[in-house]
Amino acid sequence: HTHTHTHRFTSKTMSEEKPDAVTSSTDAEENESDAPNEDWSHITKPGPHDVLCGRGGGTNNHSGNVKFRQVVNEYKLKYLAASKVDKPKVAREVVKLWRGLDPSGRFLARKDDGRRGPGSVKAEGNVWYDVGDKKAREKASQCLRERTPDVLPYVREMQRQQDIL
């Protein structure tokens, strides 16, 4: 199989974990060649580890989104069982794992969000950018909260146990 990415990415996006890798990209740094997100602000071909953010079915069927939901499913029970304080930690864990993939997992949004309708996600000329870790955690939390059929029995069981208490 062929990879659309020409660069190998290192996980420098985890600025929380590594204080020394605080490379917040301001407009001035955007042009520097050593900025880790240099090719993350203008992406024309989303890869297999790219989660496409945005409304609509087009993003849901993207291979990266499908794979991301599979990863999320493995954390759902942990998320459901977590206290309110610990829920964000589970989301952070999922993002960290996804970012650590090779090629690196990204969370992309379309620069031109005006184009809507069927096929607009796959349309030629779309430009994507990485939304950053805060938005990535929001996306992970959103997926973790989703009451999919596979977790419903556990949700019901947890509700039943809380009713007993």
Image: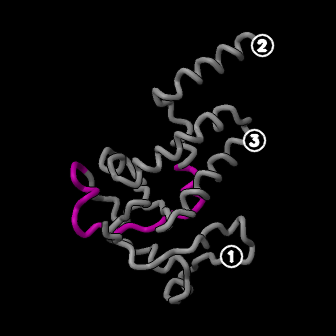
Residue 88, magenta (yes or no): no
**Residue 46 point in image, percent of width and height:** 36, 64
Q: In whole angstroms, how far apart are the C-alphas of marks 3 and 1?
A: 25 Å
The region drawn magenta spans 117-139
Residue 134, magenta (yes or no): yes
Circle 1 Cα neighbour tier, 10 Å, few/some/many (<14 / 14–19 / ≥20): few
Residue 165: mark: 2
Q: Residue at x 39, y 78 (%)?
A: 6
Q: In whole angstroms, how far apart are the C-alphas of marks 2 and 3?
A: 21 Å
Q: Residue furthest front?
A: 1
Q: Amino acid at mark 3?
A: Val
Residue at numbered disc 3: 85
For marks 2 and 3, the one nearer the N-term is: 3
**Residue 76 point in image, percent of width and height:** 58, 37
Q: Amino acid at mark 1?
A: Val
144 vs 7: above or below: above
Q: Nearer the viewer, residue 82 or 71?
A: 71
For marks 3 and 1, the one nearer the N-term is: 1
> Which image quadrant for residue 2?
bottom left
Residue at numbered disc 1: 22
Circle 3 Cα neighbour tier, 10 Å, few/some/many (<14 / 14–19 / ≥20): few
Q: Residue at x 28, y 56 (%)?
A: 121
Secondary structure at numbered mark 1: loop
Q: Residue at x 51, y 74 (%)?
A: 9
Secondary structure at numbered mark 2: loop
Q: Residue furthest bottom?
A: 32
Residue 160 horizontal side relative to residue 35, left or right = right
Residue 165 horizontal side relative to residue 157, left or right = right
